[in-house]
């Protein structure tokens, strides 16, 4: 029983350390996270904007991005300028399509609604990035505290050692050990294999 309690305490500590390490990794490398929306060549994720240009696709971090809308004679435009100042343009045709054209058309409200969605995601990402150092510190501190906190394990090991010592000092233990070894020998004679322990 004490061995099982010790194994459970060690496994619980390992689970907590693993969960904290995973949390730390997700904070350090959040990836793109869940998809929030798509319009034309832009796909919005929780932490980035995916921009398709011909056959190429690249991701742009949302943190610090500026987004603006413009409308021309044939197209609506979204200009997404990343934190380094590099602009990304998305075109949205809005004139009625010729009868034989398969190209999708976008009205101004659709494009502006998507712009607002991007701006909201940018604001959330800026808040996330602003709080990131404190979140990482909290997770790191929790990990170190869990790593250094061996009180439950130490107490369980001490109880196990006390039980072992008590069993060693018990005069009945030698008799019981002899009976156990005799039962093991009989098992092996009958089955041809050593018994499970």
Image: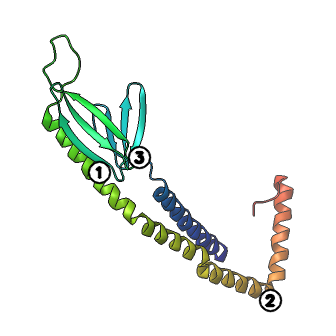
- The answer to which of 152 and 55 lies nearer the viewer is 55
* Mark positioned earlier in the residue sequence (3 or 2): 3
Above or below, 155 relative to 113? below
Callout 3 touching callout 2 (CB < 8 Å): no
For label 3, count other residues whose C-alpha is less than 10 Å away and answer few (under 14), some (14-19) or many (20+).
Answer: some
Residue 163, percent across and down? 71, 84
Tell us which disc is closer to us: 1 or 2: 1
* Residue at the spot of label 3: 32
* Mark positioned earlier in the residue sequence (3 or 1): 3
Q: CA distance from mark 3 to mark 1?
A: 12 Å
For label 2, count other residues whose C-alpha is less than 10 Å away and answer few (under 14), some (14-19) or many (20+).
Answer: few
- The answer to which of 165 and 31 lies nearer the viewer is 31
In the picture provided, is 70 more to the left or to the right than 131? left
Q: Quadrant of the N terminus?
A: bottom right
Callout 1 touching callout 2 (CB < 8 Å): no
Q: Secondary structure at mark 3?
A: loop
Residue 156, percent across and down? 64, 80
* Mark positioned earlier in the residue sequence (1 or 2): 1
Q: How many marks?
A: 3
Above or below, 46 relative to 181? above
Tell us which disc is closer to us: 3 or 2: 3
The label number, if any, that marks residue 121 in the structure image: 1
The label number, if any, that marks residue 169 in the structure image: 2
Q: Secondary structure at mark 2?
A: helix
Residue 136, percent across and down? 47, 66
Q: Secondary structure at mark 1?
A: helix
Q: CA distance from mark 3 to mark 2?
A: 62 Å
Q: Residue at x 34, y 40 (%)?
A: 87
């Amino acid at each position: 029983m004490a061995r099982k309690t010790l194994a459970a305490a060690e496994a619980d500590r390992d689970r907590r350390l693993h969960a904290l390490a995973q949390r730390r990794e997700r904070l350090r490398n959040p990836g793109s996270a869940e998809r929030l929306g798509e319009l034309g060549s832009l796909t919005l994720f929780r932490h980035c904007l995916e921009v398709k240009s011909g056959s190429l696709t690249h991701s742009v971090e949302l943190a610090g991005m500026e987004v603006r809308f413009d409308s021309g004679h044939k197209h609506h435009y979204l200009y997404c300028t990343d934190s380094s100042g590099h602009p990304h343009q998305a075109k949205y045709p809005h004139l009625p399509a010729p009868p034989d054209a398969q190209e999708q058309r976008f009205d101004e409200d659709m494009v502006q609604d998507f712009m607002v969605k991007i701006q909201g995601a940018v604001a959330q990402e800026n808040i996330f990035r602003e709080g990131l150092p404190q979140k990482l510190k909290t997770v790191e501190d929790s990990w170190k505290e869990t790593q250094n906190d061996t009180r439950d394990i130490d107490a369980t090991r001490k109880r196990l050692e006390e039980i072992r010592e008590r069993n060693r000092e018990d005069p009945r233990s030698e008799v019981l050990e002899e009976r156990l070894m005799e039962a093991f020998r009989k098992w092996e004679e009958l089955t041809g294999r050593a018994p499970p322990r």
